[in-house]
Amino acid sequence: MIVVGVALRAYRLDEPDTLKWDEHHYVETARSYLAHKYAWNDHPPLSKLIIATFMWGLGDGPLAWRLPSFLFGLANIALVGLLTQHVFKSRRAGLIAAAFVAMDGFFIAYSRTALLDGMIVAFSLASMLTILRGRTVKAVLLSGVLSGCALSFKLNGAVFVFASFLACLASRPLRKYAPLLVVSALLVFYAQCAVALVNVGRSGSVEAVIAENRAMVKNHLGYTVVHPMSSKWYTWFLPTRPIYLRREGDVDGTVKALLTLGNPVLWWTAIWAVWTSAEAVLSGGLRRLWTELTQKQSSRRIGLFWLLACYLGPILFWVPALRDAYIYHYLPSYAFALPLLAGLLTKLYSKRRALALAFVVLVMEVSFFYAPLASELPISERALAARLLPMWR
Amino acid sequence: MTVLAGPKREWYVVIGALAVGAGLLSFGRGRPFGEADRVPVKITLITADRGDLDCALDQEIAGFRCGHVGNTTAASPAPAKEQLLAPYMTPDRRLLLVPGLFEQPALSERYDRERPTGRPKHRLKRFIASCEVKLLEKVPALKVRFGKRNAWGDAKDAWVAQPLSCTVDG
């Protein structure tokens, strides 16, 4: 499944040679950086600096635009696997989680477009993995740098600075270093803003960086236009409004589509896994949970707790609805829900192997069925419609 | 469910599932229209497009040819109007090579209603031709230009489509 998932990510990555969905925001800004011209940023500049680096090395073409997303998409497969293996102390659980991410259309779509959300996922997973596994100050600093990178893609990455900080505070050997985590995250955030400003001939001072980010936040809070593809956070669980990042018909009756739609079986069972895991975590009461969190070095319950926190955090960020939200804001949450599902499935495998295997086979077949919608394989209009609920069309 | 148990059997199940999945991916995507199929297409046009759009291709397809060969030099002898391929776009920006499109009665009539001579292109009203075409062949790579004074550009995956009948909207 992992091999197939990698192939689906790589298939004609350089097509189309025009920009998809919001790619123009990021690629145009990367072009401005290469030309040392100031460009207004809707999000912090790190992603555009990375895209610009690839464009500088490979030329201004579709492969260079999308290669960073592809590479971060591959990293996501490995990182989810490692995080799951760490939490459940099971290589099998890790491999299952990695395979789920590899074959899921939501992750594939974000590995095939020059968009930021797959990159945020990679840094949030890496940050949490580092802090949960770490026992030294180095791990704290690294987790700070990684979560600072997540924050430097989009401001909703702040959730993972906060989550890593809390995990650090909860860890007995690391808690004394917790302020260092925030400091290193903020330093990374400052550094990438300053580099972008200095690159275009402006001041990279702290004041200039604050002014730049204040203007960006003000712009976000001032959004009044509601995009037709935006969706409320509570619709993401169904979901009601996946987005066509590309939909291109050909005269031969085929369509090349790229839809932000996960494997429906994984999507819905992952939510069930979140619910079941929350029950397990809370089963002994909050006091016991608190004691375990602050006293024990590591346990499965603690691991589950942090996966749940990282699932809920990005959703809670959008509950106040300060601006319009989209289905892709659920991608980081989904990345932390799949390990929970893989953990439960591994448990099931030890008791009812055949049932667990049947589930994996079902996931595999459904992934293959939906693969054309995530990897832009030509599909007839009729076959496309057969895959979609009416609200997804 | 016990029939699935056992490590060796599990591998058989997984390999079988992969094979079924590969089948779904290969054959479960529906049949596209292919060569000799008749399909409806919409083409976006202005009357100045008649004689102004060019393609360059070495190949002759079912007796139809571009006005230029692959290196963009004019074809000699020049193809007759009815045999001359020209590049057109659908409203969703798919490229088609259509021979003698403006020789279709509906388009010829539309052309006569708004002759482009002496008028700037932007003053001409854009309209849609709805045609039934016969798909002949997909050309993987060619050169096109959308105006005699414009530069040639590379294009790929363009269907050569013979018009059978057309109506005009607008």
Image (cartoon, rainbow, N blue to C red):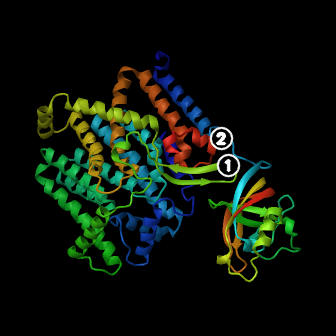
Q: Is residue B69 visible?
A: no
Looking at the rendered image, the disc whose residue lies closer to the viewer, 1 or 2, is 1
Please determine whether, in this image, residue A289 is positioned above or below residue A114. above
Query: Residue at horizontal 58%, vertical 43%?
Result: A384
Quarter-wise, where is residue A339 in the image?
Answer: top left
Viewer-proximal residue, A120 or A264?
A264
Label 2 resides on the chain identified as B
Q: Amino acid at mark 1?
A: Gly
Quarter-wise, where is residue A354 in the image?
Answer: top left
Query: Residue at horizontal 56%, vertical 45%?
Result: A372
Quarter-wise, where is residue B89 in the image?
Answer: bottom right
Left or right, B29 with reference to A258: right
Pick out the residue farthest to the top.
B2
Q: Provide the secondary structure element on which disc 1 rests.
A: loop
Left or right, B21 with reference to B108: left
Q: Which mark is residue B52?
A: none
Callouts 1 and 2 in the same chain: no
Check disc 1 and report the residue beneath it: A253
Q: Is residue A51 visible?
A: yes
Check disc 2 and report the residue beneath it: B30
Graded by Cα atoms within 10 Å as few (under 14), some (14 to 19) or many (20 or more), the crowding at tag 1 reads some
Where's residue A344, x and y in %? 34, 30
Q: Amino acid at mark 2?
A: Gly
Please determine whether, in this image, residue A371 is positioned above or below residue B129. above
Left or right, A174 with reference to B140: left
- Labels 1 and 2 touching (C-beta < 8 A): no
Viewer-proximal residue, A236 or A78?
A236
Where's residue A362, x and y in %? 49, 30
